[in-house]
Image (tube, rainbow, N blue to C red):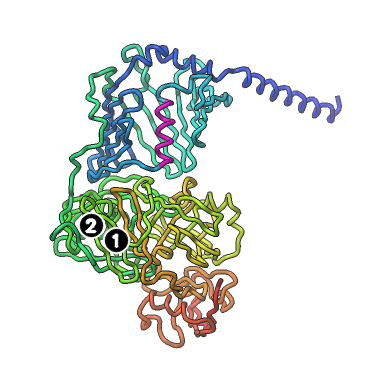
């Protein structure tokens, strides 16, 4: 046999092996596999006879551990309480209402259509409707075999007709017990590996479950310590609490109006007092809980505890927790709260010469109806129970996704959907999956470096024709597009993007968490054109107090002037930058009229250079 014949024989054999594999896969009925799985658990009648359950467990995360307690009542009723000592969480479902308590005891009712649809699917799955060949909701597909920790498994793919979620079930080919379940959602994947099956009243239950949540990479292990089948459970335990904790008081009446704020570089800053210490904090609807800077926390004698992974704008980050002492703003006093602790002060110092001690997020804002008057730099806070809106604005349903408002918005009349409303964002940014799917990644624009709690990320500012929300239309918006795939909030595909203050500052905005609504009124700065950057130059102070070039956008005046990333800026028009009132003042210089010229003195590789920069419109 010659070489060509041997190769042909190998190819033919490979084809037969592949074909045989396909035939074996196609000959395995996924419904039969799942039937064997249910029989291995104890049989469908025995499994379905378990109408209620109660379990206690230990839960372990990297840097944290505690207890978990869960009650269930079929169909679909559930309550879970997790106590990690430094942070507690409670979620529930009474079939009519899906709800959660935040870490400080505030009830949030789910109105988000995406989450409610997922709950319908989960309830039907828990009733084993996916086993029914005639189901109009579920479809099963045999997805081949796979190895999970040395165990050969049948892989069953479960899809549904209500959303794009996919569940992969890994069933041991010998015991037919489930070894692993992977839930694949548009915005993430969770892998759960099961072990230590024990019989309770004729049904096998996995007493150990190890879960990894991607893309943030959070892992946790739940080990059941006690399981009770069919206990007596009062159904009211599944209802949202009616006596939730109120952790603040108004010092006068039911509101605090016209509280001063400062709008700096499209971020909202306000004063917060803790004990005798007054400091500057950021107001941010995008923060899922209140945050204190780690260094500032330690100055107050607070020691951050634990560590979990969280998602920032562009990436993930490590989050610890502290018990925040009583604090106050003008007209409002708060009691002790649990707050996240992360390193945020350095970011504001390096990018804006600002001393920031914390972020007032969901655990602060959700207590009120908040009015934000951007043009006059005023905030007002109202008790939800006594607030009624009767102004000229437009009321928009804005269901919370997680702890963040989502609001419908359209760009150019084409890119239409729900956006996350984020008072902590300088401007608007399409989420990467949406931008990629709609061909935005190759559009011309101005490349810049964006920052969030998770760190820096690359973003391209692109000018569009219009943006429309609530019936208001604004011309020539500049919207960011991430230039590479991210892991944080901007990686979400179930929302179009992030709506920030560049657009919101046109309005007076009311944020009503109780009713999950947002009201927009034309503000005094409505449709005003604010001077944009005309240089393509970004500056910061990474270390040592010197001003350094962070980025130079291609095709801009900064690039033509010869500026490079890493250059130290020493002078502008012969004046030392230390005499020019900081980074904010330098940015203002870069927003001067087109044609404005600057002599830029830099230090590069130990040598002084003088470069000439001439501003021009970038869009």
Q: Earlier in the sequence, mark 2 or mark 1?
A: 1
Q: Is residue 340 visible?
A: no
Please name the residue shown 27% across and 44% down the image.
102
Tell me the crowding category of disc 1: few under 14, some 14 to 19, or many 20 or more residues within 10 angstroms, Cα based.
many
SS type, badge 1: strand
Provide residue 139's location: percent of width, then percent of height: 54, 26
Please name the residue shown 42% across and 12% down the image.
43
Please name the residue shown 14% across and 58% down the image.
253
Q: Main secondary structure of the magenta part?
A: helix
- Tell me the residue that label 1 is attached to: 371
Provide residue 370's location: percent of width, then percent of height: 28, 58
- Tell me the residue that label 2 is attached to: 382
Nearest the viewer among 262 and 469 is 469
Tell me the crowding category of disc 2: few under 14, some 14 to 19, or many 20 or more residues within 10 angstroms, Cα based.
many
Please name the residue shown 36% across and 73% down the image.
545
The part of the chain drawn in magenta is 113-125
| Callout 2 touching callout 1 (CB < 8 Å) | yes
Q: Is residue 406 magenta?
A: no
Q: Residue furthest right?
A: 2
């Amino acid at each position: 046999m010659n070489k060509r014949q041997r190769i042909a024989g190998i190819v033919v054999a490979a084809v037969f092996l592949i074909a045989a594999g396909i035939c074996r896969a196609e000959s395995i009925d996924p419904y039969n596999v799942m039937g064997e799985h249910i029989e291995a658990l104890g049989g469908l009648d025995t499994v379905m006879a378990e109408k209620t359950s109660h379990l206690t467990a230990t839960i372990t995360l990297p840097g944290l551990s505690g207890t978990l307690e869960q009650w269930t009542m079929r169909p679909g009723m559930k309550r879970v309480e997790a106590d990690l000592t430094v942070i507690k969480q409670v979620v529930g479902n009474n079939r009519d209402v899906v709800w959660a308590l935040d870490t400080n005891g505030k009830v949030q009712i789910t109105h988000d259509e995406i989450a409610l649809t997922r709950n319908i699917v989960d309830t039907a799955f828990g009733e084993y409707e996916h086993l029914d060949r005639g189901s109009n909701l579920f479809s099963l597909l045999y997805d081949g075999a796979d190895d999970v920790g040395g165990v050969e498994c049948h892989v069953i793919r479960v899809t549904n007709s209500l959303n794009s979620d996919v569940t992969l079930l890994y069933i041991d080919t010998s015991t037919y017990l489930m070894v692993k379940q992977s839930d694949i959602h548009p915005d993430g994947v969770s892998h759960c590996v099961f072990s230590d099956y024990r019989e309770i009243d004729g049904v096998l239950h996995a007493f150990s479950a190890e879960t990894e949540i991607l893309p943030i990479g959070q892992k946790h292990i739940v080990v059941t310590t006690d399981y009770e089948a069919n206990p007596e459970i009062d159904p009211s335990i599944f209802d949202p609490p009616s006596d939730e904790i109120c952790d603040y008081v108004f010092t006068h009446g039911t509101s605090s109006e016209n509280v001063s704020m400062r709008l700096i570089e499209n971020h909202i800053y306000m004063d917060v007092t803790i004990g005798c210490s007054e400091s500057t904090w950021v107001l941010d609807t995008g923060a899922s809980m209140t945050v204190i800077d780690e260094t500032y926390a330690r100055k107050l004698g607070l020691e951050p505890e634990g560590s979990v992974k969280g998602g920032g704008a562009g990436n993930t980050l490590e989050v610890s927790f502290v018990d925040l002492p009583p604090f106050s703003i003008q007209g409002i006093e708060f009691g002790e709260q649990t707050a996240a602790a992360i390193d945020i002060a350095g970011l504001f110092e390096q990018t804006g010469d600002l001393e920031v001690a914390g972020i007032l997020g969901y655990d602060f804002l959700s207590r009120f109806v908040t009015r934000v008057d951007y043009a006059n730099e005023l905030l007002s806070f109202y008790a939800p129970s006594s607030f009624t809106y009767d102004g000229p604005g437009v009321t928009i349903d804005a269901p919370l996704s997680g702890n963040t408002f989502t609001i419908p918005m359209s760009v150019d009349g084409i890119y239409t959907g729900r956006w996350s409303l984020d008072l902590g964002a300088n401007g608007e940014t399409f989420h990467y999956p949406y931008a990629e799917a709609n061909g935005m990644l190759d559009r011309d624009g101005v490349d810049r470096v964006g920052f969030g709690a998770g760190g820096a990320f690359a973003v391209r500012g692109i000018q569009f024709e219009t943006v429309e929300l609530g019936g208001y239309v604004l011309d020539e918006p500049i919207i960011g597009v991430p230039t590479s795939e991210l892991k944080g909030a901007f990686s979400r595909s179930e929302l179009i993007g992030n709506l920030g203050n560049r657009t919101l500052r046109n309005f007076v905005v009311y944020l009503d968490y109780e009713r999950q609504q947002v009201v927009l009124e034309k503000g005094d700065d409505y449709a005003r054109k604010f001077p944009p950057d005309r240089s393509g130059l970004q500056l910061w102070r990474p270390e040592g107090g010197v001003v350094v070039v962070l980025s130079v956008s291609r095709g801009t005046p900064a690039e033509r002037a010869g500026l490079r990333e890493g250059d130290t800026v020493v002078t502008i028009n012969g004046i030392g930058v230390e005499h020019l009132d900081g980074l904010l003042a330098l940015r203002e210089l870069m927003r001067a009229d087109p044609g404005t010229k600057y002599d830029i003195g830099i230090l590069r590789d130990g040598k002084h250079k003088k470069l000439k920069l001439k501003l021009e419109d970038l869009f």
